[in-house]
Every structure is written in C-alpha cells, then in structure tokens.
C-alpha cells in the first residue's frame, strides 16, 4: 500500500519550514556555506553548493543526503577541509528535519516522503541564503571599486 502524507501533514511541514527559527537557521547555514565555498572561477556559484542542492533534489532517502555530506567531509584536500567546517551543522539540521517528520506521522512511508519534502524546502532556504550572501558580497565589492 502506497501511503502519501495528508494535505494537513504537508501543511504542518511547510509551517515548520516557514517558522522564523527554522528559516533563519537555514539562511545562516547558507551564509556559512558562502564563507567556505564562496564561488568558482568567474564568479559562478560553487559546484559544492550545486552538488549539495542536486543531491537533495534527487535523493530518494534522507540518508542519501547525510551520506553525501559525510562522504565530502571524509575526503582529502582543501575542499574536504571546508566540508568538515560546515558538515556537522548540515547533519544537525538534517537531523532536525528527520525528527520533525517522525512527529508528523507514525507511518514509515509517509515519514519518508515528509523527510524528503522537508529536505527540499530546507535546501531552497539554504541556497537562497547562500545566493543572497553572494549577491551582497559582490555588491559591496563593486561599490568599493568606485
């Protein structure tokens, strides 16, 4: 039997994502990600951020996202060093999403879909925070050149 979350459960998940505390935590994480993965050559958004966004959008389980972050943290090199500086906070926020899904439903199929719904809403806020920080930094830099 395929059980979908109810409209009420989706609404509660969205309300949680839209709460001031949750939204600000995601935006602050976006700021922090910008500090560590400012941009690629040419001023483009860091591939690390796009990779994180892509895994969240395409994941079929929340643990796929958690595993991606742990994998990035466990690699060698400068990029891995940056992931180790932000990875625990990402994992903690994902843990919060997992916990919220557990509270919204007792049915495992519904919880799986709710976790993914929450993660996709969360990454939009995180990337939004990152992009806003990128834009304001570029604006400050261009003003400084005048």
Image (cartoon, grey):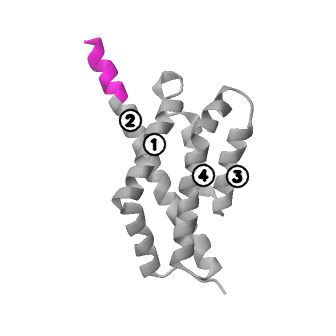
Q: Which residue is mark 1?
A: 30
Q: Residues within 10 Å of mark 3 (few under 14, many from 20)?
A: few
Q: Secondary structure at mark 4?
A: helix
Q: Which residue is mark 4?
A: 91
> Marks 2/4: CA distance?
21 Å
Q: Secondary structure at mark 3?
A: helix
Camera-side mark, 3 or 4? 4
Q: As displayed, is residue 60 above or below residue 131? A: below
Residue 25 in view in this figure: yes
Quadrant of the rendered image containing residue 107: bottom right
Q: Secondary structure at mark 2?
A: helix
Q: Which residue is mark 2?
A: 133
> Marks 1/3: CA distance?
19 Å
Estimate the x, y position of residue 60 in percent, counting from the top left: 65, 63
> Marks 3/2: CA distance?
27 Å
Q: Which mark is residue 67?
A: 3
Estimate the x, y position of residue 143 in percent, counting from the top left: 26, 19
Q: Are marks 4 and 1 in contact (CB under 8 Å)?
A: no
Magenta span:
137-146
Quadrant of the rendered image containing residue 138: top left
Q: Are marks 1 and 2 in contact (CB under 8 Å)?
A: yes
Estimate the x, y position of residue 52 in percent, counting from the top left: 58, 46
The first of marks 1 and 2 along the sequence is 1
The verdict on residue 138 being magenta is yes
Q: Residues within 10 Å of mark 4 (few under 14, many from 20)?
A: some
> Marks 1/2: CA distance?
8 Å
Residue visible at 44% across and 50% down in the picture = 26
Camera-side mark, 4 or 1? 4
The first of marks 3 and 2 along the sequence is 3
Helix, strand or loop for the magenta stretch, by majority:
helix
């Amino acid at each position: 039997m395929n059980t979908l979350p109810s409209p009420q459960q989706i609404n509660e998940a969205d309300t949680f994502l839209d709460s001031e505390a949750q939204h600000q935590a995601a935006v602050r994480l976006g700021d922090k990600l910008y500090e560590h993965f400012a941009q690629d050559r040419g001023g483009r958004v860091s591939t690390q951020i796009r990779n994180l966004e892509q895994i969240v959008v395409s994941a079929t389980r929340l643990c796929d996202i958690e595993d991606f972050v742990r994998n990035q943290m466990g690699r060698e090199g400068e990029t891995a060093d940056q992931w180790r500086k932000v990875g625990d906070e990402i994992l903690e926020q994902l843990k919060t999403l997992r916990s919220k899904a557990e509270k919204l439903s007792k049915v495992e199929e519904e919880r799986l879909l709710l976790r993914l719904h929450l993660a996709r809403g969360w990454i939009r806020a995180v990337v939004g925070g990152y992009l806003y920080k990128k834009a304001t930094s570029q604006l400050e830099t261009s003003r400084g050149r005048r």
